[in-house]
């Protein structure tokens, strides 16, 4: 993980030079590249992008917040995704989400203070026959239950630093 100064250097020296000449049409590709490299869009980085493209900070912020693909806080090292698509919702996905919230002491789209975990709700994991489904990094757990949350943490050998 980079510190804020390193993030700014990466944006200025490695990402922006790839988008020449600086034109507003490059805004979304620049934001996508920043997120791909940093896993989120730092606010200071958005100011740099607005200066680089000659756009208002409000226009850059408005565009970035319009699209749900962009994050504005650094994600946790471990991504926890709870499926709440139709099949998972019907089979108890909300209760599983609530169990994760209690275990991690965070809400949807939040990251634990130590950046160990991020919690996200997703529309579909693509395993409807295994509903309800949760994903922790690359581990997909089907036929989940609220009780299985602690077991998933232990089995996946993810340290639960938030307790």
Image (spheres, grey):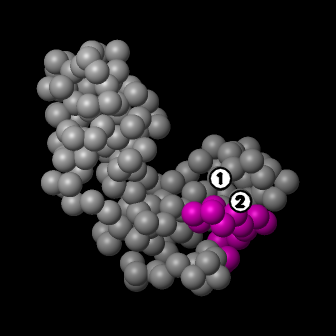
Q: Position of residue 118 (x, y in %)?
A: 44, 61
Q: Residue at x 76, y 64 (%)?
A: 142
Q: Residue at x 63, y 63 (%)?
A: 138
Q: Secondary structure at mark 2?
A: loop
Quarter of the rendering occupied by the N terminus: bottom left
**In the image, is residue 124 above or below residue 139?**
above
Marks 2 and 1: CB-CB under 8 Å? Answer: yes
Q: Read off the residue under disc 1.
A: 83
- Lateral position of residue 34 relative to residue 5, left or right: right
**Residue 143 counted in the magenta span:** yes
Q: Read off the residue under disc 2.
A: 133
- Lateral position of residue 147 relative to residue 30, left or right: right
The part of the chain drawn in magenta is: 135-148
**Residue 104 counted in the magenta span:** no
In the image, 34 versus 56, the foreground residue is 34
Q: Position of residue 7 (x, y in %)?
A: 24, 51
In the image as oriented, which residue stretches furthest toward the right? 129
Quarter of the rendering occupied by the C terminus: bottom left
Q: CA distance from mark 2 to mark 1?
A: 6 Å
Q: Residue at x 22, y 41 (%)?
A: 13
**In the image, is residue 68 above or below residue 135?**
above
Using a 10 Å C-alpha cutoff, classify the residue at mark 2 as few (fewer than 14 neighbours), some (14 to 19) or many (20 or more).
many
Q: Position of residue 136 (x, y in %)?
A: 59, 65
Q: Secondary structure at mark 1?
A: strand
């Amino acid at each position: 993980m980079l510190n804020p100064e390193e993030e700014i250097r990466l944006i200025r020296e490695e990402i922006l030079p790839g988008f020449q000449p600086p034109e507003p049409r490059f805004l979304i590709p620049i934001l996508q590249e920043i997120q791909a490299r940093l896993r989120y869009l730092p606010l200071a980085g958005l100011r740099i992008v607005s200066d680089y493209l000659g756009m208002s900070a409000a226009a850059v912020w408005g565009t970035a917040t319009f699209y749900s693909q962009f994050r504005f806080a650094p994600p946790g090292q471990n991504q926890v995704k709870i499926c709440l698509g139709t099949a998972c919702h019907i089979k108890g996905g909300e209760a599983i989400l609530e169990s994760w919230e209690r275990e991690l002491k965070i809400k949807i789209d939040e990251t634990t203070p130590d950046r160990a975990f991020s919690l996200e709700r997703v529309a579909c994991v693509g395993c409807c026959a295994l509903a309800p489904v949760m994903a922790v990094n690359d581990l997909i757990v089907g036929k989940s239950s609220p009780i299985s949350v602690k077991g998933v943490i232990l089995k996946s050998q993810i340290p639960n630093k938030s307790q």
